[in-house]
Amino acid sequence: MPPNSGWRQVPASAEMREHFGFPTMAHPDDARDWFEGLFGRQPFADEAVTYFRTLRLEVGTLDEPMGGGYWFGDRQLVMVRGTQDEAAVHELAHAWWERRRATERDGLMEVLRSMGAEPPAGFPRIAELAKVYCEGIKTQKDPSSPTGYWRGMLAEDNDHETFAGFCSGVMGDASQLPPQLRRFYKGFLRD
């Protein structure tokens, strides 16, 4: 939607105020309309869209494609700052993974270890992500890390960001995921 497109504003939720500092946000119906458009633009499987429609979906502003978002599992809330598809895909991936992680997290992290040791041929974006997820980023300073830089998903044992990061890294295009990784996205992304 272009600026001043007529979307309605309501007082921001407690989460929107706390995490983004917004005093207002998009009306829930307008936010849901934007997400419905996203479901049509992105390659989500029908099963995933059905699940997403049960969630609380919030958008801070419909005027700007700002990134940033949160998944609050305890509140069944996907919240995005603006209308950037990549941020929404990432947060929806968190929502999807939440229900599967208890049984699939160890398998996902093992695939990550394997791809970090032997990058998947023919999948350059995933190979690039696997490398930094396994080795970290030496130029990304992290004073809380014993190395002084971000050490990666394996060091953090962060399956949630691994799943969401791979998904948003390829904008939900399952054809860009190697088969050993693609299986974790069954039901979430169209084949």
Image (cartoon, rainbow, N blue to C red):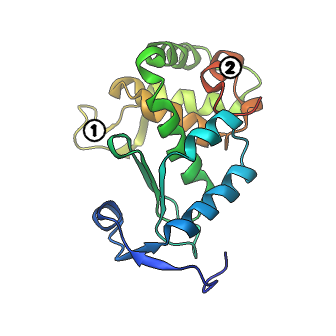
> Residue 189, image x and y in percent?
68, 34
Local secondary structure at mark 2: loop
Q: Select label 1 or label 2 by which is in front.
A: 2
Q: Depth check: give the residue in front, 58 or 54.
A: 54
Residue at image mark 1: 148
- The picture places residue 91, in percent across and down from the top left corner, at 50, 46
Amino acid at circle 2: Pro
Foreground residue, 20 or 34? Answer: 34
Circle 2 packing at 10 Å, graded few (<14), some (14-19), many (20+), is: many
- Residue 56 visible, this orientation: yes
Q: Nearer the viewer, residue 22 or 124?
A: 22
Q: In which quadrant of the rendered view does residue 150 lie?
A: top left
Q: Position of residue 21 (x, y in %)?
A: 32, 70
With respect to residue 59, does 103 lie above or below? above
Is label 1 in contact with label 2 (beta carbons under 8 Å)?
A: no
Q: Residue at x 63, y 32 (%)?
A: 188
The label shown at residue 52 is none
Q: Residue at x 52, y 45 (%)?
A: 54
Task: Determine which quarter of the picture holds residue 124.
Answer: top right
Q: Position of residue 75 (x, y in %)?
A: 35, 46
Q: Is residue 115 above or below residue 18?
A: above
| Inter-mark Cα distance, 1 to 2 | 29 Å
Question: Can residue 45 be seen in this snapshot?
Answer: no
Which secondary structure, mark 1? loop
Quadrant where the N terminus is found in the figure: bottom right
Number of marks present in the image shown: 2
Tell whether 102 sits left or right of 124: left
Disc number at residue 120?
2
Q: Residue at x 47, y 79 (%)?
A: 9
Q: Is residue 110 above or below residue 44?
A: above
Q: Residue flagged by tag 1: what amino acid is it?
A: Gly
